[in-house]
Image: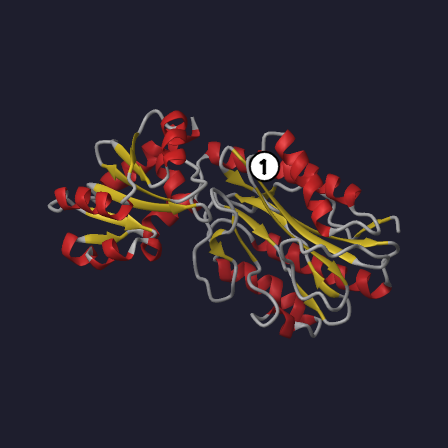
Amino acid sequence: MIAQERRKRLIDAMHESGLDALLVYGNAWQGDYLRYATDFGILEGQGLAIVRGDGHITLYVDSPLEADRAALDCPGIETVLAPDLTGEVEAALNRMRNQSMGAAPQRLLPRRIAARAGELKITDETGFVDRLLMKKLDSEVAAVRKAAKLADDGYKVFMQAARVGRADYELIAESEAFFRANGVDDNFQIIGIGGVEVKGMAPPSGKRIKRGDMVTTELTPCVDGYYAQICRTLVVGEATAEQKGAHALWREAMEAGIATVRDGVTAADIAKAENDVFRKHGMGKYATSEFTRVRGHGMGLFADSKPHILEDVTTRIDAGMTLIVHPNTYHPVVGYMVLGDAVAVTKTGCEVLTGTARELFSVPA
């Protein structure tokens, strides 16, 4: 049902924009544009799809395995195995050259097709698709809500797995096992273990937990193609006064950001609310790009989607968007700390989708 509603919305939007056809690209890392149009979550190789204004969709993939899977998973669209992916799609575009065509995301288009965009009169419609990706249908928000509930449950499993002597990959393995057993087909997760020397989170490297370590993670399970994220920090043993004080600042910043979220504000407004808390406490330096990437981001068919929550991003926040607000950054005394909640934007504020307590958790040492 979500795919059908999404497809109708896309075709209607194309008609309103005067587009006869839309070319979308996807790969195993960023497949949200492709999945929005086709409902196909690509796992290997690359895919391009041509969406026509009459509703006909042709999906071109360069992997025989993916062609077989698409034929089973997406019976309502035409699937073409195209070992010469660029060549076959270019030939199809040549046959449509008198039509009004757009493409998204422009930055990922194969170079050969991108070089002919002017000649073929293919316009950059990344922003057009971004707006559809960001502002969700009710059914899409419901999927994100389900993913957020599983993120909460997954964090409980993660906490129980955190014990002295265990390696970081063992914690992630237990989280993954829980998610897979509960129908989650993908989970983006990174981790950090240690103290002041830890400057961020990363994939597991084999580092083992010791008493006094902070353990940070973000869990991002996917349900029905939609991701939701949670960020939390725990301490192995009793938290120090410095760790507790730092976490109180992080919580104040996150709650200031969440309190700002509502229909009509901008991404910059949310980021500024978070960063102002750091500046108030003399920590403004740690809200800059030297120590942190974003103050949150969109959630949906990609784990880290637009809009990025930064003070220079003026994207309007609309009811129906789903975001995570997370003031994740480095603290010079205790190390990298994370805290983040998923929210769905409403006309008057937001619905917090994450149910896990906003605590600095402690597990036995």
The residue labelled by disc 1 is 147
Instruction: Please tell me which residue lies in front, 250 or 28.
Output: 28
Badge 1, how many Cα within 10 Å: few under 14, some, many 20+?
many
- Residue 355 appears in the picture as rendered: no
For image coordinates 71% across by 54% down, the residue present is 206
Left or right of 148, for residue 249: right
Instruction: Give residue 70's quadrant in the image.
Output: top left
Q: Which color mode does the image show?
A: secondary structure
Residue 233, position as x, y percentages in the image: 73, 53
Residue 268, position as x, y percentages in the image: 50, 62
For image coordinates 59% across by 30% down, the residue present is 183
Q: Is 1 above or below relative to 120?
A: above
Instruction: Give residue 5's quadrant in the image.
Output: top left
Left or right of 285, for residue 16: left
Amino acid marked by disc 1: Ala
Instruction: Please tell me which residue lies in front, 236 or 262.
Output: 236
For image coordinates 28% across by 39% down, the residue present is 82
Residue 261, position as x, y percentages in the image: 55, 52
Residue 164, position as x, y percentages in the image: 84, 51
For image coordinates 14% across by 56% down, the residue present is 119
